[in-house]
Protein backbone atom coordinates (compact mmCIF):
# COMPACT_ATOMS: atom_id res chain seq x y z
CA UNK A 1 0.00 0.00 0.00
CA UNK A 2 1.25 3.44 -0.94
CA UNK A 3 1.19 6.54 1.24
CA UNK A 4 1.02 10.10 -0.10
CA UNK A 5 1.03 13.58 1.37
CA UNK A 6 -1.80 16.00 0.68
CA UNK A 7 -0.54 19.54 1.13
CA UNK A 8 -2.97 22.01 2.69
CA UNK A 9 -2.43 25.25 0.77
CA UNK A 10 -4.32 27.51 3.18
CA UNK A 11 -1.83 29.99 4.57
CA UNK A 12 1.09 28.17 2.92
CA UNK A 13 3.72 29.62 0.61
CA UNK A 14 4.52 27.70 -2.57
CA UNK A 15 8.27 27.42 -1.74
CA UNK A 16 7.45 25.70 1.56
CA UNK A 17 5.08 23.36 -0.26
CA UNK A 18 7.91 22.48 -2.63
CA UNK A 19 10.22 21.89 0.31
CA UNK A 20 7.70 19.54 1.96
CA UNK A 21 7.33 17.63 -1.31
CA UNK A 22 11.08 17.22 -1.65
CA UNK A 23 11.28 15.87 1.90
CA UNK A 24 8.45 13.45 1.07
CA UNK A 25 10.26 12.20 -2.02
CA UNK A 26 13.63 11.87 -0.33
CA UNK A 27 12.28 10.01 2.69
CA UNK A 28 9.87 7.42 1.32
CA UNK A 29 6.43 8.76 0.48
CA UNK A 30 4.94 7.74 -2.86
CA UNK A 31 3.12 10.87 -3.95
CA UNK A 32 2.10 14.45 -3.23
CA UNK A 33 -1.28 16.04 -3.82
CA UNK A 34 -2.54 19.62 -3.51
CA UNK A 35 -6.20 20.41 -2.90
CA UNK A 36 -8.23 22.78 -5.07
CA UNK A 37 -9.80 25.60 -3.06
CA UNK A 38 -9.42 29.26 -3.94
CA UNK A 39 -10.64 30.86 -0.70
CA UNK A 40 -8.92 30.12 2.59
CA UNK A 41 -11.82 31.79 4.34
CA UNK A 42 -13.43 28.34 4.53
CA UNK A 43 -10.81 27.52 7.17
CA UNK A 44 -10.35 31.03 8.57
CA UNK A 45 -6.88 31.29 7.00
CA UNK A 46 -5.38 34.30 5.18
CA UNK A 47 -4.90 32.96 1.62
CA UNK A 48 -4.83 29.90 -0.63
CA UNK A 49 -2.63 28.74 -3.53
CA UNK A 50 -3.46 27.45 -6.99
CA UNK A 51 -2.91 23.67 -7.06
CA UNK A 52 -1.51 23.43 -10.57
CA UNK A 53 0.98 26.26 -10.04
CA UNK A 54 2.17 24.56 -6.85
CA UNK A 55 2.27 21.14 -8.53
CA UNK A 56 4.25 22.53 -11.45
CA UNK A 57 6.84 23.92 -9.05
CA UNK A 58 6.94 20.59 -7.23
CA UNK A 59 7.27 18.68 -10.50
CA UNK A 60 10.34 20.72 -11.43
CA UNK A 61 12.01 19.83 -8.12
CA UNK A 62 11.17 16.10 -7.91
CA UNK A 63 11.72 13.04 -10.07
CA UNK A 64 10.04 10.02 -8.45
CA UNK A 65 6.81 10.82 -6.63
CA UNK A 66 3.41 10.98 -8.29
CA UNK A 67 1.62 14.35 -8.37
CA UNK A 68 -1.92 15.57 -8.72
CA UNK A 69 -4.84 17.69 -7.51
CA UNK A 70 -7.02 16.21 -4.78
CA UNK A 71 -9.58 17.00 -5.86
CA UNK A 72 -10.01 19.32 -8.86
CA UNK A 73 -13.39 20.98 -8.40
CA UNK A 74 -15.48 20.31 -11.51
CA UNK A 75 -17.72 23.30 -10.73
CA UNK A 76 -14.84 25.74 -11.04
CA UNK A 77 -12.90 24.16 -13.93
CA UNK A 78 -14.24 23.47 -17.41
CA UNK A 79 -13.13 20.01 -18.61
CA UNK A 80 -11.01 21.47 -21.43
CA UNK A 81 -9.19 23.80 -19.03
CA UNK A 82 -8.69 20.94 -16.60
CA UNK A 83 -7.36 18.69 -19.35
CA UNK A 84 -4.90 21.39 -20.43
CA UNK A 85 -3.66 21.85 -16.85
CA UNK A 86 -3.21 18.09 -16.42
CA UNK A 87 -1.37 17.75 -19.74
CA UNK A 88 0.90 20.68 -18.91
CA UNK A 89 1.73 19.12 -15.55
CA UNK A 90 2.43 15.86 -17.38
CA UNK A 91 4.97 17.60 -19.59
CA UNK A 92 6.89 18.50 -16.42
CA UNK A 93 6.42 15.10 -14.75
CA UNK A 94 5.95 12.51 -17.51
CA UNK A 95 4.22 9.38 -16.25
CA UNK A 96 3.93 10.76 -12.70
CA UNK A 97 0.56 12.51 -12.84
CA UNK A 98 -2.70 11.39 -11.26
CA UNK A 99 -5.86 13.47 -11.56
CA UNK A 100 -8.60 13.34 -8.95
CA UNK A 101 -11.80 15.23 -9.65
CA UNK A 102 -14.70 16.01 -7.37
CA UNK A 103 -18.28 17.16 -7.72
CA UNK A 104 -18.01 20.37 -5.71
CA UNK A 105 -19.54 21.33 -2.39
CA UNK A 106 -22.99 20.34 -1.23
CA UNK A 107 -25.24 23.11 0.15
CA UNK A 108 -24.49 22.38 3.82
CA UNK A 109 -20.72 22.09 3.42
CA UNK A 110 -18.46 24.86 4.71
CA UNK A 111 -16.89 24.90 1.24
CA UNK A 112 -20.20 26.06 -0.26
CA UNK A 113 -19.21 29.66 0.55
CA UNK A 114 -16.74 29.51 -2.35
CA UNK A 115 -19.59 28.78 -4.77
CA UNK A 116 -21.77 31.49 -3.27
CA UNK A 117 -18.95 34.05 -3.48
CA UNK A 118 -18.56 33.71 -7.25
CA UNK A 119 -22.13 32.79 -8.14
CA UNK A 120 -21.48 29.16 -9.01
CA UNK A 121 -24.62 27.06 -8.93
CA UNK A 122 -24.79 24.25 -6.38
CA UNK A 123 -26.52 21.40 -8.16
CA UNK A 124 -28.64 18.69 -6.55
CA UNK A 125 -26.64 15.58 -5.77
CA UNK A 126 -27.92 13.49 -8.71
CA UNK A 127 -27.11 16.28 -11.14
CA UNK A 128 -23.65 16.66 -9.63
CA UNK A 129 -22.98 12.98 -10.27
CA UNK A 130 -24.04 13.31 -13.91
CA UNK A 131 -21.84 16.37 -14.35
CA UNK A 132 -18.95 14.53 -12.67
CA UNK A 133 -19.29 11.67 -15.16
CA UNK A 134 -19.39 14.11 -18.08
CA UNK A 135 -16.33 15.96 -16.74
CA UNK A 136 -14.47 12.65 -16.59
CA UNK A 137 -15.51 11.68 -20.12
CA UNK A 138 -14.66 15.08 -21.60
CA UNK A 139 -11.27 15.39 -19.87
CA UNK A 140 -10.26 11.90 -20.98
CA UNK A 141 -11.45 12.55 -24.52
CA UNK A 142 -9.38 15.74 -24.81
CA UNK A 143 -6.29 14.00 -23.41
CA UNK A 144 -6.73 10.98 -25.70
CA UNK A 145 -7.26 12.97 -28.89
CA UNK A 146 -4.30 13.81 -31.10
CA UNK A 147 -3.80 17.62 -31.04
CA UNK A 148 -4.37 17.78 -34.77
CA UNK A 149 -7.73 16.02 -34.61
CA UNK A 150 -11.01 17.67 -33.59
CA UNK A 151 -12.66 16.93 -30.27
CA UNK A 152 -16.42 16.49 -30.26
CA UNK A 153 -18.39 15.87 -27.08
CA UNK A 154 -22.12 16.18 -26.48
CA UNK A 155 -23.46 15.95 -22.95
CA UNK A 156 -26.10 17.50 -20.78
CA UNK A 157 -23.65 19.97 -19.23
CA UNK A 158 -20.83 20.20 -21.76
CA UNK A 159 -20.74 20.53 -25.52
CA UNK A 160 -17.44 20.55 -27.38
CA UNK A 161 -17.42 20.89 -31.16
CA UNK A 162 -14.42 20.82 -33.45
CA UNK A 163 -11.90 21.82 -30.79
CA UNK A 164 -8.28 21.20 -31.81
CA UNK A 165 -4.72 21.90 -30.65
CA UNK A 166 -5.24 21.71 -26.88
CA UNK A 167 -3.19 19.12 -24.96
CA UNK A 168 0.36 18.18 -25.87
CA UNK A 169 0.88 14.44 -26.53
CA UNK A 170 1.66 12.27 -23.55
CA UNK A 171 0.30 9.44 -21.44
CA UNK A 172 -3.27 9.86 -20.25
CA UNK A 173 -3.10 9.88 -16.45
CA UNK A 174 -5.43 7.85 -14.27
CA UNK A 175 -8.55 9.86 -13.43
CA UNK A 176 -9.96 9.30 -9.96
CA UNK A 177 -13.24 10.40 -8.39
CA UNK A 178 -13.26 11.90 -4.93
CA UNK A 179 -16.30 10.45 -3.17
CA UNK A 180 -17.96 10.00 0.19
CA UNK A 181 -21.48 8.81 -0.67
CA UNK A 182 -22.35 5.29 -1.81
CA UNK A 183 -23.76 6.34 -5.19
CA UNK A 184 -20.68 8.38 -6.16
CA UNK A 185 -18.36 5.61 -4.98
CA UNK A 186 -20.24 3.18 -7.20
CA UNK A 187 -20.09 5.66 -10.11
CA UNK A 188 -16.31 5.75 -9.72
CA UNK A 189 -16.11 1.96 -9.55
CA UNK A 190 -18.01 1.61 -12.82
CA UNK A 191 -16.34 4.37 -14.84
CA UNK A 192 -13.19 5.94 -13.37
CA UNK A 193 -9.66 4.67 -12.82
CA UNK A 194 -9.97 4.89 -9.06
CA UNK A 195 -11.85 6.31 -6.11
CA UNK A 196 -10.63 8.42 -3.20
CA UNK A 197 -12.85 7.92 -0.17
CA UNK A 198 -12.82 10.09 2.94
CA UNK A 199 -12.16 7.88 5.96
CA UNK A 200 -15.19 7.22 8.13
CA UNK A 201 -16.55 4.44 10.31
CA UNK A 202 -18.28 3.07 7.19
CA UNK A 203 -15.07 2.71 5.15
CA UNK A 204 -15.02 -1.10 5.25
CA UNK A 205 -18.66 -1.30 4.19
CA UNK A 206 -18.13 1.24 1.40
CA UNK A 207 -15.23 -0.74 -0.05
CA UNK A 208 -17.06 -4.05 0.29
CA UNK A 209 -20.07 -2.63 -1.56
CA UNK A 210 -18.03 -2.12 -4.75
CA UNK A 211 -15.96 -5.29 -4.38
CA UNK A 212 -17.70 -7.29 -7.10
CA UNK A 213 -17.50 -4.40 -9.57
CA UNK A 214 -13.79 -3.90 -8.98
CA UNK A 215 -13.08 -7.63 -9.14
CA UNK A 216 -14.83 -7.85 -12.51
CA UNK A 217 -12.97 -4.86 -13.91
CA UNK A 218 -9.61 -6.14 -12.76
CA UNK A 219 -10.39 -9.56 -14.23
CA UNK A 220 -10.77 -7.77 -17.58
CA UNK A 221 -7.32 -6.24 -17.15
CA UNK A 222 -8.51 -2.80 -16.08
CA UNK A 223 -6.60 -1.00 -13.36
CA UNK A 224 -8.57 0.46 -10.49
CA UNK A 225 -7.14 2.02 -7.34
CA UNK A 226 -8.87 2.53 -4.01
CA UNK A 227 -7.41 5.35 -1.94
CA UNK A 228 -8.43 6.83 1.39
CA UNK A 229 -8.25 10.45 2.48
CA UNK A 230 -7.57 11.48 6.09
CA UNK A 231 -5.39 13.82 8.13
CA UNK A 232 -1.88 12.64 8.94
CA UNK A 233 -1.42 11.52 12.54
CA UNK A 234 1.94 13.12 13.26
CA UNK A 235 2.27 11.10 16.49
CA UNK A 236 2.01 7.72 14.74
CA UNK A 237 5.18 6.18 13.34
CA UNK A 238 3.43 5.48 10.01
CA UNK A 239 1.24 8.56 10.03
CA UNK A 240 -1.87 6.65 11.05
CA UNK A 241 -3.56 3.29 10.63
CA UNK A 242 -1.60 1.19 8.14
CA UNK A 243 -2.14 -2.55 8.48
CA UNK A 244 -5.82 -2.07 9.31
CA UNK A 245 -6.29 0.09 6.21
CA UNK A 246 -4.35 -2.29 3.98
CA UNK A 247 -6.48 -5.20 5.18
CA UNK A 248 -9.57 -3.42 3.85
CA UNK A 249 -8.17 -3.60 0.31
CA UNK A 250 -6.97 0.00 0.14
CA UNK A 251 -4.19 0.66 -2.38
CA UNK A 252 -3.15 4.15 -1.27
CA UNK A 253 -3.45 6.41 1.76
CA UNK A 254 -3.62 10.15 1.04
CA UNK A 255 -2.70 12.02 4.23
CA UNK A 256 -3.33 15.71 4.75
CA UNK A 257 -0.63 17.83 6.40
CA UNK A 258 -1.00 21.45 7.42
CA UNK A 259 1.36 24.44 7.32
CA UNK A 260 3.75 25.17 8.80
CA UNK A 261 4.80 21.72 7.63
CA UNK A 262 6.65 19.60 10.18
CA UNK A 263 9.50 18.61 7.90
CA UNK A 264 11.45 16.58 10.43
CA UNK A 265 8.39 14.56 11.35
CA UNK A 266 7.44 14.05 7.69
CA UNK A 267 10.98 12.80 7.07
CA UNK A 268 10.80 10.37 10.01
CA UNK A 269 7.45 8.95 8.93
CA UNK A 270 8.67 8.64 5.34
CA UNK A 271 11.74 6.72 6.50
CA UNK A 272 9.50 4.27 8.38
CA UNK A 273 7.32 3.82 5.30
CA UNK A 274 10.38 3.14 3.13
CA UNK A 275 11.25 0.19 5.35
CA UNK A 276 7.93 -1.47 4.48
CA UNK A 277 8.65 -1.66 0.76
Image (cartoon, rainbow, N blue to C red):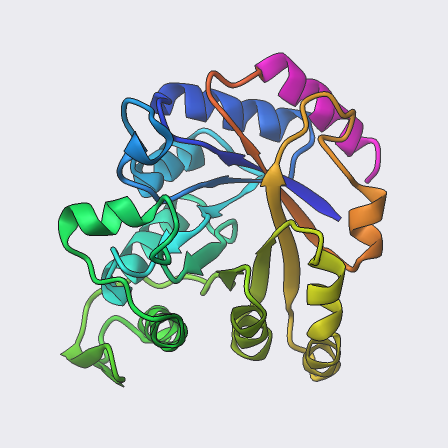
Tell me where residue 241 appears, x and y as whole percent: 77, 39
Q: Is residue 268 placed above or below 183 in the rendered structure?
A: above
Magenta residues?
A: 263-277
Q: Residue at x 51, y 23 (%)?
A: 20
Q: Looking at the image, is 58 positioned above or below residue 251?
A: above
Residue 97, horizontal then vertical, whole percent? 48, 51
Magenta span includes 159: no
Rendering coords of residue 260 (x, y %): 47, 16
Looking at the image, the residue that sits furthest to the front is 108
Q: In the displayed structure, does residue 95 sit left or right of residue 142?
A: right
Toward the viewer: 159 or 85? Answer: 159
Report x, y in % for residue 201. 71, 52
Instruction: Left or right? Give the position of 148 relative to 219.
Output: left
Quadrant where the C terminus sits is top right
Is residue 270 part of the magenta span, yes or no? yes
Residue at left 35%, top 63%? 169
Q: Is residue 38 left or right of residue 174?
A: left
- In the displayed structure, 147 sits above or below 180; it is below
Amino acid sequence: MKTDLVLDAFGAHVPEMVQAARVAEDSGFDGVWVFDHFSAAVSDKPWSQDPFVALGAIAAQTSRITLGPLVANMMNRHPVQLALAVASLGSLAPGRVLCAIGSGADPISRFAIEHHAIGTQILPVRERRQRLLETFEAVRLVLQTDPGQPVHYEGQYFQISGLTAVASPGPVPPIIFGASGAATIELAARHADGVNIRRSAQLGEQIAAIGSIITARRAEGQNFEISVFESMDMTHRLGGLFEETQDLGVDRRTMMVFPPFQLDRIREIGAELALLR
